[in-house]
């Protein structure tokens, strides 16, 4: 794309092209604002006084600025247990899942592996055919994982898609690196751990991030596999607060008398902000890794 | 390779002997791949055994008392008005999402590709990708806030503009368009990225040569950029086929309610309500199996068609 700059200077762009450029930039500025506004709005509602929020009409800035809603949100037990479960699940799931993905993808990237094609098919087929909700649910019940936090982790550990990304990357590593290690007497296991893995840090980071986001946002697994509310994921806790006004008030320790000082609207908004903030803060720094992952996966292996 | 040549001298058993040698040589690789394969077998293939309950009258409380009923559950599927309605809703929602949601990322990617200011482009991309990483629980929370019957911002705007009091979340006409728009909001930015991957592979010299030949930007787009991303467009189209019966469980589950079941209840939400909540396992497993089989047939045949017409398929 660098080369295209040459064109701009070498040949004068026409009036039509100039108009297009202006419109194009304007369009994307508007689009970006549209993307951001919903988050902005919720933050502003959460910072407004409950009575103003109830009245509506908050556009750009909070009305009667107050932090009181956040004070009551952080008094809730549920949000902590939600964070605990989600962090537990995300950390263990990401570490285990990423490692397992790399382990699976490396041998599959070798053409010489006997049966490799069959194994790859086994992996790919899961991408286009799924047993469905009920059989998956029965599996969790049958292996005794029901109402256990590991039911939120294990079924999602490895995805065929991540295996493909990882495999494509391993294929791009020159064979000669491994050859020289082999001459020095290293076996495939050693080569994988001491040569391949250190070379794959960026791709592994990408897979890890995709996996982490998936675990962080997972809601359905809790609904299907978890009964006790103290083991619910953050998303499930949040969902419960959003749909159940009473629940939201109680969990925030708001008794009937105090309701004039607060209300479900601002508590819901504050809960949304609290659950989204970790992603909003980390996202700009790691965004390039997500892009990288798609770029590798896009070059079909 | 010399090992291979040597074994070629002894024709009998040499194939198997060679295979044995290869397997022994790669023993560490097999060991590495084993845990992953076990994972896929336990969590993806063993549940497939339970698909048999679609052909049974399964008794979840006493599985031994279940009886085989052949295709009776599938016959029930297609005679039950409730399921036919759900099937129709699924198709309507997913096809509308596809018709609108498929071309828009392509257009956005092409427009963005015309931007020369790299910095601006990077910032715009970062913002456009953002909603993709936010869960439907959170987005639904925001949507419910915007569409709140009494004080929602959008409810207010609709009222001010049309003078009508439209409750989008419970309106049978407005609910599906809302699904499409919110799906677009979440996915269109991220959808562009795969096309950028394809565009990054275009040789800049092509544009230079075209410019020297006097090709204007639009012609360059038509003759260089578009052909460059065509294979990606086709692959995305194939992958989309697999999703034709996935109208978006998470999104709909978070937003729908009884008043809009008529237009918004899809196969997945139906399976959840009837299967998990009312424990009618056999009927809903049949519904799920029907869905998976259709998806499989679609993706295999579209891939076949793509290859037949000279395009690159997904396998």
Image (cartoon, coloured by chain):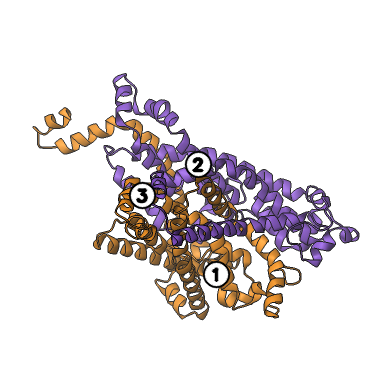
Q: Where does residue B205 sit, x and y in percent of width and height?
A: 32, 46
Chain identity of mark 2: A
Q: Are marks 1 and 2 in contact (CB under 8 Å)?
A: no
* Element at label 3: helix
Give residue B36's position: percent from left, percent from top: 42, 42
Pointer 3 residue: A122
Q: Residues within 10 Å of mark 3 (few under 14, many from 20)?
A: some
Label 3 chain ID: A
**Secondary structure category for the residue under label 1:** helix
State which quarter of the image contains the N terminus of chain B. top left
Q: Is residue A117 above or below residue B135?
A: above
Q: Which chain is purple?
A: A
Instruction: Check if mark 3 and mark 2 are on a common chain.
Output: yes
Subunit ID for the residue under disc 1 = B
Q: Which residue is mark 1?
A: B270
* Residue B93: % across, % down: 50, 71
Q: Residues within 10 Å of mark 1 (few under 14, many from 20)?
A: many
Residue closest to the eye, B19 or A79: A79
């Amino acid at each position: 794309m660098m080369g295209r700059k040459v064109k701009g200077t070498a040949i004068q762009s026409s009036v039509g092209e100039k108009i297009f450029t202006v419109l194009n930039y304007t369009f994307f500025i508007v689009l970006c604002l549209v993307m951001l506004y919903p988050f902005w709005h919720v933050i502003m509602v959460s910072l407004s006084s409950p009575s103003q929020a109830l009245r509506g009409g908050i556009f750009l800035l909070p009305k009667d600025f107050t932090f009181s809603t956040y004070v009551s949100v952080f008094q809730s037990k549920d949000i902590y247990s939600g964070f605990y479960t989600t962090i537990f699940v995300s950390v263990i799931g990401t570490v285990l899942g990423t490692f397992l993905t790399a382990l699976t993808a490396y041998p599959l990237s070798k053409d010489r592996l006997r049966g490799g094609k069959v194994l790859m098919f086994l992996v790919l087929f899961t991408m286009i055919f799924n047993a469905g909700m009920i059989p998956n649910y029965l599996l969790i019940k049958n292996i005794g994982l029901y109402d256990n936090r590991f039911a939120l982790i294990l079924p999602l550990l490895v995805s065929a898609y991540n295996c493909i990304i990882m495999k494509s990357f391993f294929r791009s590593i020159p064979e000669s690196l491994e050859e020289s290690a082999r001459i020095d007497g290293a076996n495939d296991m050693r080569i994988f751990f001491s040569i391949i893995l250190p070379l794959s840090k960026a791709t592994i980071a990408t897979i890890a991030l995709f996996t982490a986001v998936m675990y962080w946002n997972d809601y359905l697994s809790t609904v299907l596999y978890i009964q006790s509310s103290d083991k619910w994921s953050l998303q499930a806790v949040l969902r419960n607060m959003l749909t159940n006004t009473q629940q939201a008030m109680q969990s925030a320790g708001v008794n009937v008398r105090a309701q004039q000082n607060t209300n479900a609207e601002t508590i819901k908004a504050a809960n949304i902000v609290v659950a989204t903030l970790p992603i909003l803060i980390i996202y700009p720094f790691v965004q390039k890794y997500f892009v990288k992952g798609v770029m590798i996966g896009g070059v079909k292996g | 390779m010399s090992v291979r040549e040597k074994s070629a001298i002894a024709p009998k058993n040499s194939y198997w002997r060679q295979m044995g040698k290869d397997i022994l040589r790669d023993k560490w690789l097999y060991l590495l791949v084993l845990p992953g394969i076990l994972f896929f077998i336990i969590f993806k293939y063993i549940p497939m055994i339970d698909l048999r309950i679609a052909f049974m009258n399964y008794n979840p409380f006493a599985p031994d008392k279940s009886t085989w009923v052949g295709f009776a559950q599938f016959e029930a599927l297609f005679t039950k008005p409730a399921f036919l309605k759900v099937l129709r809703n699924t198709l309507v929602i997913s096809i509308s999402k596809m018709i609108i949601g498929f071309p828009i990322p392509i257009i956005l990617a092409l427009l963005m590709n015309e931007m020369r200011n790299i910095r601006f482009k990077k910032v715009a991309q970062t913002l456009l990708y953002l909603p993709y990483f936010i869960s439907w629980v959170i987005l639904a929370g925001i949507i419910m806030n915007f569409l709140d019957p009494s004080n929602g911002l959008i409810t207010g705007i609709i009222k001010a503009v049309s003078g009508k009091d439209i409750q989008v979340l419970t309106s049978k006409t407005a609910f599906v368009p809302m699904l499409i728009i919110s799906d677009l909001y979440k996915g269109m930015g991220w959808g562009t990225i795969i096309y950028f991957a394809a565009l990054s592979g275009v040789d800049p010299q092509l544009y230079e040569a075209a410019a020297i030949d006097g090709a204007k930007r639009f012609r360059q787009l038509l003759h260089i950029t578009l052909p460059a991303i065509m294979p990606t467009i086709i692959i995305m189209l194939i992958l989309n086929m697999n999703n034709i019966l996935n109208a978006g469980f998470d999104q709909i589950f978070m937003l729908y309610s009884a008043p809009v079941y008529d237009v918004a209840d899809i196969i997945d939400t139906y399976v959840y309500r009837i299967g998990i909540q009312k424990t009618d396992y056999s009927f809903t497993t049949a519904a799920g199996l029907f869905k998976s089989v259709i998806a499989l047939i679609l993706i295999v045949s579209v891939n076949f068609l793509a290859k037949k017409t000279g395009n690159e398929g997904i396998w």
